[in-house]
Amino acid sequence: MKIGDLIEIINPKPGFDDGRNCGNVLGFDTYDSEWVAIPEKLVEIHWNNGTIGWILQSRVRLVKDLDELTHEQLEEVQGGMTPELFNNWRCSILNKGLNNDE
């Protein structure tokens, strides 16, 4: 991950929607506290809702990693699909997810 990369939140908190789905990396820092044994990496993000804020790096991923299906998406897979049909289905699901973020 580097400055300028497009990221998205992994597993957003249920019932909490502040409009932050994806954004661009602006910077990096480390959160060090007497209550946390290991310092945590932070990422500064310019979010899609126009705000700028910090989030734990472990809570975001690069958008280029979106070729991985979520558990919810995998539950929709129909048995007996050929590899070609599965790949077409997978591409349509991933493209639908990207279009919904706009």
Image: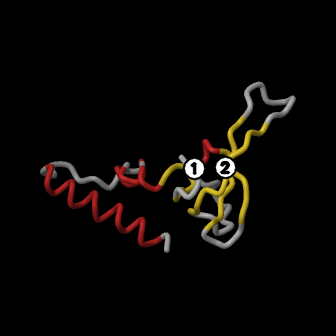
Task: Identify the residue at image location x=53%, y=56%.
Answer: 5
Q: What numbered label is drawn on residue 60?
A: 1
Give the SS element for disc 2.
strand
Q: Which residue is mark 2?
A: 43
Numbered disc total: 2
Residue 10 in the image, given as x and y percentages of width and height: 55, 50
The residue closer to the viewer here, 20 or 42, is 42
The residue closer to the viewer here, 83 or 31, is 31
Residue 11 in the image, given as x and y percentages of width and height: 56, 51
Residue 11 appears in the figure: no
Q: Amino acid at mark 2?
A: Val
Residue 2 in the image, given as x and y percentages of width and height: 55, 49
**Side of 80 relative to 25 (left or right):** left
Please tell me whether mark 2 or mark 1 is closer to you in this view: 2
Residue 93 appears in the figure: yes
Q: Amino acid at mark 1?
A: Val
Give the SS element for disc 1.
strand
Extreme residue toward the right, this view? 34
**Side of 39 relative to 102 (left or right):** right
Dot 2 or dot 1, earlier in sequence: 2
Task: Identify the residue at image location x=34%, y=50%.
Answer: 74
**Side of 19 relative to 32 (left or right):** left
Q: Are marks 2 and 1 in contact (CB under 8 Å)?
A: yes
